[in-house]
Amino acid sequence: MTIYYALHNSPAGELLLMSDGRALTDLHMTTGKYVPEARKDWVRDDALPVFALARKELDAYFAGTLRTFTVPLAPKGTDFQKRVWTALTKIPFGETRTYGQQAAMIGQPAAVRAVGAANGKNPIGIIVPCHRVIGANGTLTGYAGGLHNKELLLKLEGIL
């Protein structure tokens, strides 16, 4: 399978967009944790339609005019991780949930730590909004894109 990529500038810094040619498979802040190492077999394609849609929607999100993304997504992970990431997409714009609430959303209320670990491995930041998950005491806990970016995104959504 060919891996396509493009870069996009945003208020959260440079973003690495990745695709299988049909859907977005990854979106990483290039200064964050878990950014995949570039490989020689990756193909840069700034004109790929999925990247054009992702850029348009990200720009609208950062401009405050988009609350729901429609770009097709195809994250790679375990079945458990995919359930956790799907639950993230159900957290409305401008709202937060705790890790415990998210664990309950997937029907596994005792899996709080596993949910936190899966959130940390979310390959499609911003669009799959793991930044909307906070600690039980209301604190901003870890974020692969950096806590300063989690704060930026929550402020953009009017939460902070």
Image (tube, rainbow, N blue to C red):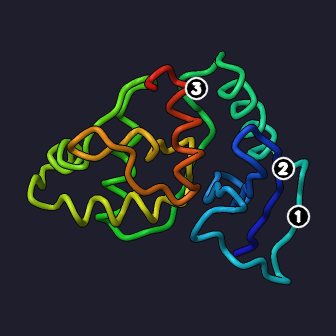
Residue 58, located in which quarter of the rendered image?
Answer: top right
Q: Secondary structure at mark 1?
A: strand
Name the outermost residue toward the left.
110
Q: Quadrant of the N terminus?
A: bottom right
Q: Nearer the viewer, residue 126 or 144?
A: 144
12 on left or right of 121: right
Instruction: Name the amino acid, label 3.
Output: Leu
CA–CA distance in space, label 1 to label 3 = 30 Å
How packed mark 3 is, by other alpha carbons closer than 10 Å (few <14, some 14-19, many 20 or more), is some
Q: Mark 3 highlights which residue?
A: 156
Q: Position of residue 31 (x, y in %)?
A: 70, 62
Q: Mark 2 highlights which residue?
A: 48
Q: Mark 1 highlights which residue?
A: 44
Residue appearing at x 82%, y 47% in the figure: 8
CA–CA distance in space, label 1 to label 2 = 9 Å
Above or below residue 75? Residue 91 is above
Q: Position of residue 76 (x, y in %)?
A: 50, 66
CA–CA distance in space, label 2 to label 3 = 28 Å
Mark 1 near mark 3, Cβ–Cβ under 8 Å? Answer: no
Instruction: Name the amino acid, label 2.
Output: Leu
Q: Nearer the viewer, residue 34 or 20?
A: 34
Residue appearing at x 42%, y 57% in the figure: 142
Q: Nearer the viewer, residue 43 or 113?
A: 113
78 on left or right of 51: left
Residue 32, located in which quarter of the rendered image?
Answer: bottom right
